[in-house]
Image (cartoon, rainbow, N blue to C red):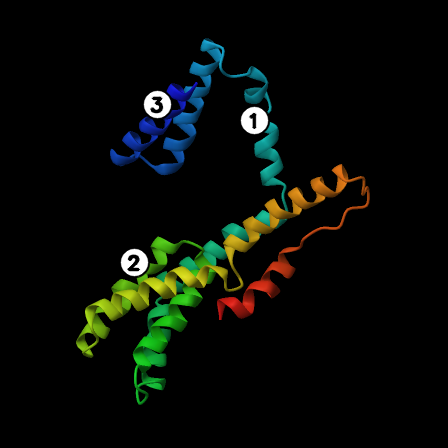
Amino acid sequence: MEIMALSMFAASCLMLLTGYPVAFTLSGVSFLFGLLGLFTGHFDFAFLIALPQRIFGVMTNEVLVAVPLFIFMGTMLERSKIAEELLENMGRLFGTMRGGLGISVVIVGALLAASTGIVGATVVTMGLLSLPTMLKRGYNPELAAGTISAAGTLGQIIPPSIVLILLGDVVANAYQKAQVEMGIFAPETVSVGELFAGALIPGL
């Protein structure tokens, strides 16, 4: 069983390195290894039968509907050049301050990271937009790269955050299940709004 798990991991990495799309790679490799495990007796066919129900459950989850909408919002900010113009305007606003451009990069990077929820995309976008300008203004390359990376990474917990939406769905289900097992048949839940409220101050 351990060999099959390692083989599945190696096959996934190999397919990703060939440039095949991530969605098709992960789903295709897992499905093929599921069939292989079915024939070798390491996998129960009931899991494959339940797959459509799992997919339908995710599609009908009202909390997860916000995820593609937030990604769409972040993509629109990037494609419409609003983020770039926002960075330029904030650079002018804080231009007279010491380190004003760095402050602008942190604010815009946190905004993009919170809306898109994708660290890599945010860091790359902010790097393309702001790194040449920061270097032209005389910023140390290490400081400029660190500022962009930190802004794109730490902005994940600033509402609206896709990470908190996904975490809220998982935590709510686990919390309700734990209460039912404790004999509490009117369980409370953890809402995404509560996670947003709890993460706002640490994120800022």
User: In the rendered image, is residue 191 in sight?
Assistant: yes
The foreground one among 3 and 197 is 3
Label 1 residue SS: helix
Mark drawn on residue 131: none
Quadrant occupied by the N terminus: top left
Q: Please report whichever mark, 3 or 2, sits nearer to the chain's N-terminal start.
A: 3
* Mark 2 burial class by Cα count in 10 Å: few <14, some 14-19, many 20+: some
Look at label 3 and name its amino acid: Ser
Label 2 residue SS: helix
Mark drawn on residue 51: 1
- Rendering quarter of residue 129: bottom left
Using the image, determine if residue 147 lies above or below residue 137.
Answer: above
Q: Please report whichever mark, 1 or 3, sits nearer to the chain's N-terminal start.
A: 3
**Residue at the (55%, 63%) spot, across then down:** 199
Residue located beneath label 3 in the image: 7
**Residue at the (27%, 70%) spot, across then down:** 130
